[in-house]
């Protein structure tokens, strides 16, 4: 009987050790989905919609979870203020029963919203350098001269114009054109047209009047 008891104890210990070794703890990055965001609002903060989730469970299950991280879903209220704080619900993750959530960091998210507006901005092209000797700059054409942009009100309201990278005039002795991308203000601003065509017109300067 003592020998049989020893065998049972040894088997139990082996199962316990094996079970402990087959459990792991990992941290995954879980994205956050946002639903019910009005068309006229933009999320200023947080900049990254994701949190860190620490999980504990069978190693083979955690390997699957790591390969396809779970996500949280936040449904915004119909009446949205400038700020909204939401606690993250572990039930959103839809994890296997044997996988436990040990920590969510941060456990809640505070959103900061802004109005999404549209406005027409004048396009400005900085000029660098001088045209070739014996020529003068006649005209700078920008097509289109104005662009429709949309973005967060806090970014767009102070703006009166939008610029391109500089156009280098160095040694230009004929009509020259170049397509330049717009330098949009802020990370929330989008333009219906992202570049403009800039055409530089030059002409020869009049030769000096000779004497008798």
Image (cartoon, rainbow, N blue to C red):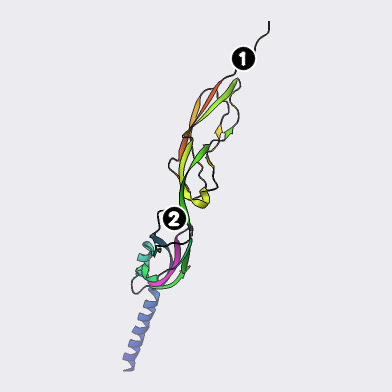
Q: Which residue does the numbered mark 1 point to in the structure image?
A: 207
Q: In the image, which is nearer the foreground, mark 2 or mark 1?
A: 2
Q: Which secondary structure, mark 1? A: loop
* Residue 89 part of the magenta-drawn span: no
Q: Residues within 10 Å of mark 1 (few under 14, many from 20)?
A: few
Magenta run includes residue 57: yes
Tag 2 and tag 1, C-beta contact below 8 Å? no
Query: What range of the chain is rendered magenta?
Result: 47-58
Q: Main secondary structure of the magenta part?
A: strand
Residue 22, image x, y percentages = 37, 73
Residue 1 sits in quarter? bottom left
Q: Position of residue 41 (x, y in %)?
A: 44, 55
Q: Kindly identify which residue carries mark 2.
A: 41
In the image, farthest residue toward the front:
79
In the rendered view, tell whether residue 39 sits above or below residue 91: above
Quadrant of the rendering where the C terminus is positioned: top right
Task: Find residue 183 and report its horizontal and vertical position in percent.
Answer: 51, 42
Question: Quadrant of residue 103 in the image?
Answer: bottom left
Q: Nearer the viewer, residue 103 or 55?
A: 103
Q: Give the Cα separation between the discs numbered 2 and 1.
A: 60 Å
């Amino acid at each position: 009987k003592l020998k049989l008891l020893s065998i049972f104890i040894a088997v139990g210990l082996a199962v316990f050790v094996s079970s402990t070794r087959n459990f792991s703890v990992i941290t995954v990055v879980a994205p956050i989905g946002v639903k019910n965001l009005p068309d006229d609002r933009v999320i200023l903060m947080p900049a990254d919609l994701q949190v860190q989730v620490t999980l504990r469970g069978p190693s083979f299950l955690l390997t699957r979870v790591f390969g396809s991280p779970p996500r949280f879903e936040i449904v915004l209220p119909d009446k949205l203020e400038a700020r909204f704080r939401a606690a993250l619900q572990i039930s959103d993750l839809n994890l296997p029963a044997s996988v436990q959530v040990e920590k969510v960091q941060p456990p809640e998210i505070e959103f900061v919203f802004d109005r999404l507006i549209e406005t027409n901005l004048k396009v400005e092209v900085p000029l660098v350098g001088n045209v070739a000797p014996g020529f003068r700059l006649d005209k700078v054409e920008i097509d289109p001269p104005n662009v429709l942009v949309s973005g967060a009100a806090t970014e767009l309201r102070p703006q009166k114009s939008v610029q391109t990278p500089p156009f280098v005039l160095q040694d230009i002795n004929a009509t020259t054109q170049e397509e330049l991308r717009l330098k949009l203000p802020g990370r929330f601003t989008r333009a219906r047209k992202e570049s403009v065509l800039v055409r530089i017109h030059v002409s020869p300067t009049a030769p000096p009047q000779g004497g008798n």
